[in-house]
Amino acid sequence: MSSPQTPDADRAAEQAGRLALVTGAGRGIGAAVVDALAARGARVLATDLDAGSVGQVAARHPDGQVTARRLDVTDAAAVEALVADAEDTLGPLDTAVNVAGILRTSPVLDLDDTDWADTFAVNTGGVLHVSRSVARRMTGRRRGSIVTVASNAAGIPRAGMAAYAASKAATVMFTKCLGLEVAAYGVRCNTVCPGSTLTDMQRGMWERSGADAASAERAVVEGDLAAHRTGIPLGRIADPADIADAVAFLASDRARHITLHDLYVDGGATLRA
Ligand SMILES: NC(=O)c1ccc[n+]([C@@H]2O[C@H](COP(=O)([O-])OP(=O)(O)OC[C@H]3O[C@@H](n4cnc5c(N)ncnc54)[C@H](O)[C@@H]3O)[C@@H](O)[C@H]2O)c1
């Protein structure tokens, strides 16, 4: 039985009284981040390009705890307008979590310029727009936490993923540079780098390869040395909640002395060599 001193009880109140903005919150990891922060007591402004899906995520929470809004993170003016409106109507943002991302796979020799530009527009430009907008306000209040979901592809070369991996590596370094600039104002900036995680993004990649889901998942876990992939040492693919837990930790006061950090949540897939 839990008492007020147990970790579970502490966790339930960890984000009490706080307001968090989450992008890419309509499904997958973003939706899990909304659930994780709400379970810890935060009010959440859940945003996504797809208004319908993020509305469904908000609907599974009690009245008023999660507000859903459509947001295209590539649109800097729309980001600024949403953040300004959120602060006017909901209050000061304590936390921002950049989750919105896209994956376009192709060998570099066939890489389409539009795929390259779109990938950077969402995965890197979107993170700039949201982080800059919230950091301007957080620095004035001398508190706040920004967590960006990048990818373990930022730290290891992957065939067929050059645009994605390069965009995520840029995003990790952008977040560290921002973190350095705002540290004096008590604002923390960290990244979470997931490995393969069971979401529509992962399933889409399997579908395009023509493999059935079960054998594709097994191949991810076991690895493929011909493709220079070592597999996942912990022997399982991540659930979105595994990533969301790491995000919630970095957003919390338990991580109050952690900034400019890059937390890999990939079951050891990149060997962190
Ligand atoms: N699933 C994985 O294996 C994996 C691994 C490493 C990193 N990641 C990263 O985690 C994040 C979430 O991935 P996921 O697997 O949940 O993906 P997903 O495709 O299931 O969900 C991504 C969400 O982002 C939204 N989105 C896309 N473009 C947007 C835009 N311009 N503005 C706002 N929202 C937009 C989509 O509508 C969608 O709801 C991404 O940044 C992804 O790169 C995922």
Image (cartoon, rainbow, N blue to C red):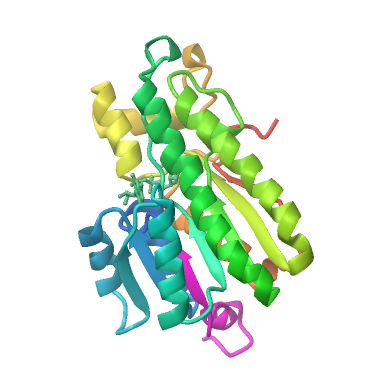
In front of the other: 84 or 209: 84
Where residue 256 appears, x then y in whole percent? 72, 68
Taking the magenta stretch, the answer to whether it contains residue 194 is: no
- Where 200 falls versus 38 (above or below)? above
Q: Locate residue 57: give its quadrant.
A: bottom left
Instruction: Classify the position of the C terminus by image quarter.
Output: top right
Q: Residue furthest right?
A: 184
Relative to 131, does residue 61 appear above or below in the rendering? below
Residue extending farthest left: 52
The residue at the point 62 percent across, 62 percent down is 250
Is 5 one of the magenta-colored residues? yes
**x 36%, y 44%: residue:** 198
Q: Work out which residue is located at the far top of the displayed protein and give it.
A: 109
Tell me the quarter of the picture where residue 156 sits: top right
Residue sitting at x 24%, y 60%: 51
Q: Can you say whether 62 is above or below 122 in the image?
A: below
Q: Nearer the viewer, residue 212 or 258?
A: 258
On the rendered structure, is 113 left or right of 271? left
Q: Residue at x 75, y 61 (%)?
A: 183
Answer whether residue 204 is visible to the viewer in this image.
yes
* Residue 143: % across, % down: 67, 73
Magenta range: 1-23
Return the x and y of residue 169 as percentages of the image width and height.
Answer: 59, 35
Q: Is residue 245 visible?
A: no
Choose between 247 and 22: the one closer to the eye.
22
Q: Residue at the bottom extreme?
A: 4
Percent across and percent down for residue 189 are 65, 57
Say whether residue 86 is left or right of residue 165: left
| Residue 124 shown left or right of residue 46 in the figure | right
**How many labels, in total?**
0
